[in-house]
Amino acid sequence: DRALIKSSIKNNALFRDFLDSDLEDFIDVFAPKSCKGGCTVIQQGDVGDTFYVVQSGALDIFINMEEGGTRVEKRVGIPYRRGGAFGELALLYENPRAATIRASEDCDLWEITRTAFKAL
């Protein structure tokens, strides 16, 4: 599990310049989270405070768009799978989420909150 988290965050631009010792400290504060297929992990427009790494399962990405005066949720991008990571900007900024992330099957994730990240 630690190797998966380390591999995922090392490839992320936000963490690329971290020393290995810093990464190890960072990995220590991740907590497991499970969600059932269909569960919304991130809701577009909500202010986020959590970063996630996918242990297992798949999650789809959706964006709300205006289409003919109607708001429509569209699936975009490639689903997150094992080793995928999302939500990193929430560790730095209190901005609304840019997309909705929803489990398309049962998932096991690793998560870290802004509070835990800033305490490092």
Image: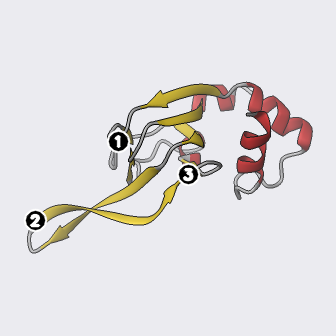
Q: Secondary structure at mark 1?
A: loop
Which numbered mark, 3 or 1, is in the foreground of this view?
Answer: 3
Q: Quadrant of residue 103?
A: top left
Relative horizontal placement of residue 114, taking residue 48 as reference (left or right): right
In terms of depth relative to the viewer, which is nearer, 23 or 101? Answer: 101
In terms of depth relative to the viewer, which is nearer, 81 or 50? Answer: 81
Amino acid carrying mark 1 in the image: Asp
Relative horizontal placement of residue 63, taking residue 70 as reference (left or right): right
Q: Residue 46: which numbered mark, if any?
A: 1
Q: Residue 70: which numbered mark, if any?
A: 2
Quadrant where the C terminus sits is top right
Residue lying furthest left in this view?
Answer: 69
The vertical placement of 104 against 36, above or below, is below
Q: Give the mark nearest the N terminus, 2 or 3.
A: 2
Q: Give the mark nearest the N terminus, 1 or 2.
A: 1
The vertical placement of 63 against 41, above or below, is below
Amino acid carrying mark 3 in the image: Arg
Near mark 2 (Cα within 10 A), the count class, few <14, some 14-19 or many ≥20, is few
Residue lying furthest bottom in this view?
Answer: 68
